[in-house]
Amino acid sequence: MSPEPQPSAIVGAVEIQDGTDAVGRSGGGRCAEQDAVDRLGGDPDLVLFSAAVRPRTGYELPVCRAVCQVAYAREQFDDGVAFDSFKRQRGRRYADAAAEQPFEQADGQWFDAGDIDDMAAAATVVALRAELSERRSGVEPAGTRCHYADGWLRAYVDICDPAANLTLATIRIDLTDRWLTAGWCSATRAELDDDLSDALGGDLFVEQADKVARVRAPERAAQWLVRQLDRPVVRLDWRHGDGVAAQAWMLADSDRMLVERGDWQLSERPDSRDAATLVRGAKLA
Ligand SMILES: [Zn+2]
């Protein structure tokens, strides 16, 4: 008997005409917002959402670009909610979101995994664990997890800004008997999308692992992860009077936007920011 797995995201929602509310949970390829709309059962356009939260860590998750920024209007989300800006597109329907944290934070070990009966997969988990426990990467054990089924290992590492209580992205590493693939994903969609290539934003690493290469897969995966953890992430701030008008987080080595909140027209123009602060990774030369 295994307990019901925690969802990777939860969200609060309320139907504005009759005031009924619901908590949505992600799973089965679907976002927590979609689940909440199903539970409420009415018109999706009349639903307001809080920010989504990762129960394991308690950190906010940005609103996904692939589904929820298309399906719901920005006005349907709480003020100050963060939005995934992977693969930024013009003409999207934006939205804003807030939070409820009914779950205990998970403690435990890095990449808490059940039994893995495959040597290369098990060795990969061990190698990833070793790298994370040996360095101060800013990654917390609760921000890592892995799933193994039918010869397919998926390991996840949340990249967060703890000061902002925000998940910026999720690194996902997949190992099958034919492929070692890894990349930066939308934090919200990383566990929902079957196809890693669809979820990716950022630098994609793909490698075919033949039988010989497979022996090296654990080391390759671990070395790749370490390089990603060293990448600099900066937070950009736009001020308005004494307050903050907008914020955006980006990978500073590639100018790739990860997440934004507040006035998105400001974050369209990174050069116009008032301040830039390194929040993780190596200092830029
Ligand atoms: Zn979504």
Image (cartoon, rainbow, N blue to C red):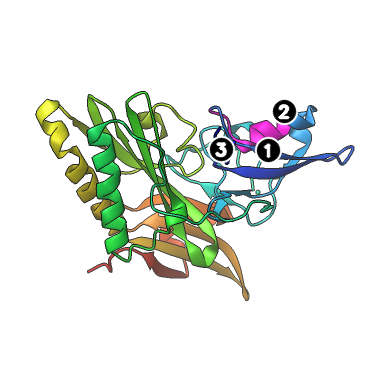
Q: Position of residue 18 (x, y in %)?
A: 90, 37
Which of marks 2 and 3 precedes in the sequence? 3
Is disc 3 surrounded by few (<14), some (14 to 19) or many (20+) residues within 10 Å? few
SS state under label 3: loop
Nearer mark to the viewer, of 3 and 2: 3
Residue sitting at the far left = 212
Residue that numbered label 3 is attached to = 5
Callout 3–callout 2 Cβ contact below 8 Å: no
Type of secondary structure dominating the magenta stretch: helix
Identified by mark 1, the residue type is Gly
Q: What secondary structure is found at the residue carrying circle 1?
A: strand
Return the x and y of residue 90 as percentages of the image width and height.
50, 38
Q: Residue at x 47, y 70 (%)?
A: 274
How many other residues sit within 10 Å of disc 1, few (<14), some (14-19) or many (≥20)? Answer: many
The C terminus sits in image quarter: bottom left
In this rendered view, identify the residue nearer to me: 107 or 15.
107
Q: Amino acid at mark 3?
A: Pro
In the displayed structure, would residue 186 be above or below residue 239? above
Q: Amino acid at mark 2?
A: Asp
Judged from the image, the secondary structure of the residue bearing numbered disc 2 is: helix
**From which residue to which does the magenta span run?**
29-38
Residue nearest the viewer, comparing 6 with 245: 6
Q: Could you tell me which residue is drawn at 56 percent across and 32 percent down?
A: 1
Q: Earlier in the sequence, mark 1 or mark 2?
A: 1
Identify the mark nearer the N-term, 3 or 1: 3
Q: Kindly identify which numbered label has been placed on residue 38.
A: 2
Query: Quick check: marks 1 and 2 in contact, CB under 8 Å?
Result: yes
Q: Which residue is mark 1?
A: 24
